Amino acid sequence: MLHTLKKYLFLFLLILNINNIYTAENPYIFIDSNAQDMVKVLTSNSSLFESDRETYENKIKEIFEPMIDFRRVSASVMGKKYYLMATKEQRGEFIDIFKDSLLDTYAETLAQWGESTISTEFPKDDFLSKKFESFESNVEVKQILNTGTSEYPISYKLRKSDNGWKIVNIIINGVNLGLTFRNQFQALAITHNEDIELTLKNWVSDAGDAGIS
C-alpha cells in the first residue's frame, strides 16, 4: 500500500514538473495558465469583492505580479529622455511606485469583470513541442475576454528573460497600456517643469477601464 502511494505521488510530482516546464518555456501556455488561474480567483472569491476588497485584489496580484518585467516596463513608461535624467535611485523608486499603481489598477479592473471567461488564441502549428530557445525573443499572445455581454480582445507582448517569459506591454480593447502610461508620465513631467522627484511623487497609473464594461 505504501509502495503504491509513493508511486502515485511520484507520478503526480512528475506531471506537475512537466506542466511547470511547459508553462515556463511556452509563452502561450504561460499566459493561458495564469489567465485561467485568474478566472478561478474571480469566480471562486466573488463574495470577497464586496466584503474584503483588499484581500480579493491581493489574490489577483499574487498571480499577475510575477508575470511582468517591471524594470523594463517602468523604463519604457519614463521614456528615454526622463529615464536618462533620473538618478539610479529615482529609477528604482519609480519601479516600486509604478508596480504598486499598475497592480492596483489592474486588480481593481479585473475584480469588476466577475463571471468572465478568457480564451487564448493558440497557433496552429505544433507549438507544444517547441523549446524555449526556439521561440523568437519577442512574442505576442492574444486572448478574448468574454464578460457575458461583450467580447474584448487582449494582446500581451512578451519578452524572453533569464527567468522565462515576462510581459512587457498589454493592449486591452485597442488601448495600449504602455503607450498610455508613457504619455501620462510625459504630461506629468511637463506639468512639474521636468522635475523628476515631483513627477514621481504625483504619479498615478490611470488607464480607465480600457473601454470594458
Image (cartoon, rainbow, N blue to C red):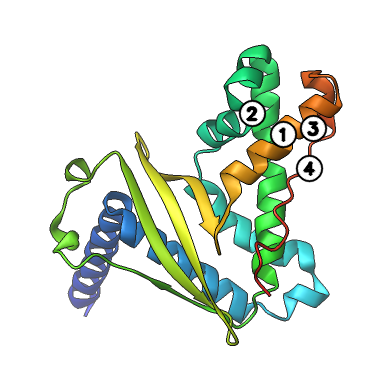
Three-letter residue code for mark 4: Val
Task: Check the image and report above or below for 96 versus 81.
Answer: below
Q: Disc 2 vs disc 1: Cβ atoms closer than 8 Å? A: yes
Sequence-wise first label, 2 or 3: 2
The first of marks 4 and 2 along the sequence is 2
Disc 4 secondary structure class: loop
Give the residue at mark 2: 78
| Residue appearing at x 65%, y 79% in the figure | 114
Is residue 146 something that shows in the picture? yes
Q: Are marks 1 and 3 in contact (CB under 8 Å)?
A: yes
Circle on res. 185: 1
- Whether residue 74 sits left or right of residue 66 in the image: it is right
Calculate the distance from the C-alpha at mark 3 to the C-alpha at mark 4. 10 Å
Q: Residue at left 73%, top 81%?
A: 47
Mark 2 residue type: Met
Q: Are marks 2 and 3 in contact (CB under 8 Å)?
A: no
Indicate the position of residue 162 as horizontal and vertical percent values: 34, 34
- Give the class, few, some or many, for how many residues have Cα within 10 Å of label 4's Cα (few <14, many ≥20): some
Badge 2 or badge 1: first in the primary sequence? 2
- Image quarter of residue 213: bottom right
Cα–Cα span, label 4 and label 2: 13 Å
Identify the residue position indicated by label 4 in the image.
204
Query: 60 and 174: which one is in front?
Result: 174
Q: Circle 3 sits on which residue?
A: 188
